[in-house]
Image (cartoon, rainbow, N blue to C red):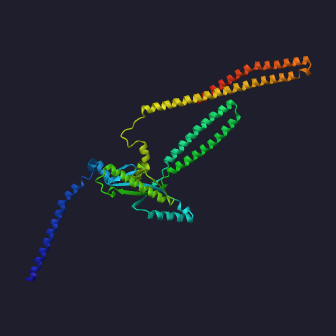
Amino acid sequence: MGSELIPILQMGIYFIIGIMIILVLLYLYLMKPKTEKREKPETDEAILDDKTLKENKAKQDYGKFVGNLSKESIMEFMEFDEIVDSMIVRKNGNQYIMILQCNGVNYDLMSEQEKIAVEEGFVQFLNTLRFPIQLYIQSRTLNLRDIIEEYKSRIDNLTVEIDKIDAKIAQAKTMGNKALREKLEFEKRRKVNILEYGISITDYVEKLSSNKNVLQQRTYVVVSYYSAEIGGGIEKYSKEEIYNMCFSELYTRCQNIASALGNSQVSCSILDSEELAELLYIAYNRDEAELLQLSKALDAQYDSLYSTGKDVLQKKKEKLDKEINIAAIDMATDSILKADRQKQIEDLEFAINKEEKIKQKASELLDSYENQLDPRVFKLAKEEIKKSGKKEEKETPKKLEEAKKTTTKKKIVKRKKIED
């Protein structure tokens, strides 16, 4: 009986296994069309449609994000309220910050005695501290824009000075003043050498400024003061009074720090509002600060809602200044020409008087020897003296006329140079 059941059980097991295989194959066959339907939409059009939907959704999300942004949320991110009167105001006016910029010392090049003096001065500074401070170091790309602009301004001024010297040299040549011309030519050579040196220095600094790998470190001392530190409770003080007391206390603290660091040969200066804005701008926008500097943004008036032209009164003032300068140049030129003409006339008059005095003196000497000379010789000598005087009188008007013509020519030449 047991041996007869074994084949029956085996057949039952085979039957069950066969049914399971059939069910599995049927399941796979039924699932195959669904898989094809899922893979079928993976075409270029379907991908583009899906991408467009994602982009539109992203734009909508970004628009909602920007729409939700407000001035208050941005100021919370910035972690300060405002910058006013060389102070950073934080926490709704409860904290005030003033920052000192410190210029370092060349410690490695000092002698041992100087190093000891610096260390002792710094120890003394630490011992005198009665309030907390923070040290902040900021690395910046070397910015030599202001120095380059100053160099270029000086080069332009030197060019103008050289042009003026050229005009004076031409004037000296016209007047025939050799000594003055040589002196002016020497001054011109000196100015030209300075100009060439300035141009080379400017080019070198511009190349140095274009190297973005050149960095500089600036060290700052951050001094804080809380309105809660005011004794006697702040409820009885107005907001303006609290502000003034905080400013006075911060300024006093910064002056004490600067005085104490001075013993270590470290010079300090309190940052003004614009310098504080630049410090925070670089801290929050380290990458963008290299491309767009805050000073350039302020010069371009990016912080203004609109830009305006020059005031009408300012334009009139500039026009009047220009007219005054032109009139002053004309007046100075006329005075020089008149003085030159007067000098030549005085020189001629002196020459005429000189000849007259010589004739008078010669006549007096001849009279003194009258008794010793032959009467005829005496008479002829007298007539000779008179003839020499008449000759000078005839030549004098011609010399005066020539002098006037010469001064008129000089005046025309000088006016042309001024107009050019």
Does the rendering let one see residue 202? Answer: yes
Nearer-the-camera pick, 409 or 35? 409
Residue 398 placement, left or right of 145 = right
Does the rendering let one see residue 46? Answer: no
Q: Which residue occupies 58% across, 40% down?
A: 158
Residue 137 placement: quadrant = bottom left
Residue 131 placement: quadrant = bottom left
**Vertical side of 36 occupied by 399: above or below:** above
Nearer-the-camera pick, 351 or 276? 351
**Vertical side of 336 occupied by 94: above or below:** below
Q: Position of residue 145 (x, y in %)?
A: 49, 47
Q: Which residue occupies 11% across, 77% down?
A: 9
Q: Position of residue 269 (x, y in %)?
A: 46, 53
Residue 11 placement, left or right of 413 = left
Nearer-the-camera pick, 167 or 102? 102
Residue 2 placement, left or right of 342 = left
Q: Position of residue 355 (x, y in %)?
A: 78, 24
Quadrant that contains the N terminus: bottom left
